[in-house]
Image (spheres, helix red, strand yellow):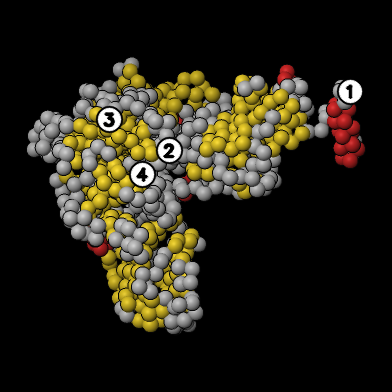
Amino acid sequence: MNQSICNKVLTIAAALMGSGLATCCAAEPIVIADFEGADFGNWKVTGDAFGAGPVHGGLPNPWRADLSKPVDGFKGRGFATSYHLGEEGIGSLTSPEFKIERKYISFLIGGNKDLDASMNLLIDGKVVRVAGASRDLPEGSETLVPGSWDVAEFTGQSAVIQIEDPTPTRHISVDQIVQTDVNPPPTAPPTPKLQLFADARRDFKIEKRYLHIPIKNSPPARPIVNTTVDGKVVMKNTIGLADGTPDWWACMNVGAWKGKTLTLQVEKMVAGSKALELIEQSDSIKGADTLYRESLRAQLHFSPRCGWNNDPNGLVFSQGEYHLYYQLNPYGCDWGNMHWGHAVSSDMVHWQELPIAIYPHAPDDSVYSGSAVVDKANTSGWKKGPADLIVAAFTSTARGECIVYSNDKGRTFTEFDGNPVVKHPGRDPRLLWHAPSKQWVMAVYDEDAGKRCIAFHTSPDLKKWTYQSRIEGFYECPDIFELAVDGVASNKKWVLTAANSDYRIGTFDGKTFTPETAMLKGHLGEAFVAAQTFSHDPKGRTIQIGWLALHVVGMPFSQAMSLPNQLTLHSTPDGPRLAWSPVDELKSLRAKSHTVGALTLAPGAPNPLAEVSAELLELRATFTPPAKGEVKFTLRGVTIIYNTEQQDLAVSGRHVAVPLRDGKIDLTVFTDRIVFEVYAAGGQCYAPVSCKPDPAALGAEVSVTGGNATFQKLEMYELNSCWTKP
Ligand code: FRU
């Protein structure tokens, strides 16, 4: 049958179906939603996850560049997704009522593989069919794949479809929901067909410190790997094992079990996999020869040796060392298997990675974000020996907010036997000593009130905690600190902030934060999440590090931390505002300086930075731009353009509003292999922007259009890598 005859037959069949006479063949499909319009039409939208309408192209407005991924597999231009705020949005989309008139409802669906976010068919208010995404986000792209429900038994009944994303850690994407008589065969199987072993295992007589485990960055499956010693599961991790040549080797620290037999038991391993056979024991770290020199390894920013990191945790200074703990997946380049990784530094610039500091307490537990302080007065009574007593708080996903302490300079921690100290739907405890009320405070993300809040609890001794108050409107990873406005000690204000770095300024009496401002914008870039400030900086500064949520693929690591930035509060006509400036310690990286000094730059003038040639650069400039024109910096092939009329700074195409101050712009830029960090307007505009400059582009250039620019300062520094010893 040719196509037009076939269409006609279908149309006639549909007409007959409508009149109840069709019995012989498939009726024309009925499109319930194709998400091609600018909005959701008569679908009901709740919450913020689905935005105002369907999206076109990739996942929308992600503030985590690591998850900014193209999407394919949808039909036409648009599809619906709950990714409008990244994973954090919650909400639902509900169709108008429709009558079930075909045997199947087919659709295209993607997102995280979890029925937390799902598409449901409801009849009489009851869920009768559920569909979830068919796989987790693979590296590089997210594909919507076909799915369908057999709904023949509901023929003639009224139904609605509800797409819901009720939790802030998932997303779902849907397109092309169609009633059809033809059950569509899945055209693109979500994952290669796997033959699974029920129980693959290998025993190791432990003689060395490490097991080297072969890892694939985009594995066809991530099986659960149980580590068993003396018949007890001591660790449970989800690991993308490499069946053949690995992308990199993860290092499992097994030194504690020397002399014992340790078993790795893999739940559902890919048939024929050689992964277990490839595992080696060793006392040294594999790949140490290329370590920190990998092509996409940030050279000014900390990143763990291998695996995935997200939030900085437990930033604390003690006895000459800055400690940086962080959310770490030691066994994969994406999120999962959360431990506290650990690095130390004397200057926050040159870091030394140490062994994992906090492991999950039990196989089904994870160590989520938290903070650390020094209990100088030994209020807890846990101090033993000469080392500072470092106390950390973190979220144990299985238990609640937990307290641990260290008497060995933060290397290892002991559990407080009263854990968990706070139990609630929430996470990410931030500890601080509130001197005026002489008590410990825990600011913690909390959903107890059914809303996204920061809750405050207090304690005299870090053991007994009392709930005090809550403030709405903040999401994950709270931080709270006091700063002197313009450095005036008699005018101090408290700043309350959370994972996206937006903040409110106000007062804090140790129990309640009373805001004096609305929510103010934090960083203006991308890829800056869950920042935290150091406790006890020896110079009394407030120094913040954030997670640079980048998208680095093909490496044994995939994320990094921001530069350490000093935070200050400055008066503005609108009230006090935060400013970020890279810490002075970074000056130790300066290798060569190009100080151009004061200069008037005319359009077409020779490039005053012509002699610069390095991949790691620091630009410091103050200039009066032409009234109607642009000043353009090209650093390592990446453009940073100030447009005076728009008062706009375009960093590699990303627009940041930067107001002129006294007719001038001040600009600081650090260039690294995967990110540029940009500071302007006295640091009130801070924008980390993901950039991957061409390794061959080493120069710098500045030019002007539309009139002259007067530079009061133009300095460029070629920098050393932070991975070379100072
Ligand atoms: C923020 C966050 C935290 C949580 C951690 C888990 O990025 O979601 O709320 O503790 O990451 O890794």
Is residue 1 positioned above or below 529 on the image? above
- Per the rendering, the mark at residue 498 is 4
Q: Which residue is mark 2?
A: 335
Instruction: State yes or no: discs 3 and 1 in contact (Cβ < 8 Å).
Output: no
Ranked by sequence position, the earlier of labels 2 and 1 is: 1
Rounded to the nearest angstrom, the CA distance separating label 3 from label 2 is 31 Å
Give the residue displayed 44% in from the left and 26% down from the top: 224
Is residue 152 positioned above or below 175 on the image? above
Instruction: State yes or no: discs 3 and 2 in contact (Cβ < 8 Å).
Output: no
**Is label 1 in a helix, a strand or a loop?**
loop
Q: Amino acid at mark 4?
A: Ala
Q: Residues within 10 Å of mark 3 (few under 14, many from 20)?
A: some
Give the residue displayed 64% in from the left and 26% down from the top: 121
Snapshot quadrant of residue 597: bottom left
Rounded to the nearest angstrom, the CA distance separating label 2 from label 1 is 55 Å
Q: Which residue occupies the foreground of this view, 86 or 675?
A: 86
Rounded to the nearest angstrom, the CA distance separating label 4 from label 2 is 20 Å
Q: Which residue is mark 1?
A: 21
Instruction: State yes or no: discs 4 and 2 in contact (Cβ < 8 Å).
Output: no
- Per the rendering, the mark at residue 467 is 3
Q: Which residue is the extreme one toward the top?
A: 231
Q: Which residue occupies the foreground of this view, 682 or 468?
A: 468
**Is label 2 in a helix, a strand or a loop?**
loop
Q: Amino acid at mark 2?
A: Trp
Is ligand 1 within 8 Å of the beta carbon of the residue shown at mark 2? yes
Left or right position of 334 against 370:
right
Q: Which residue is the extreme one toward the left?
A: 386
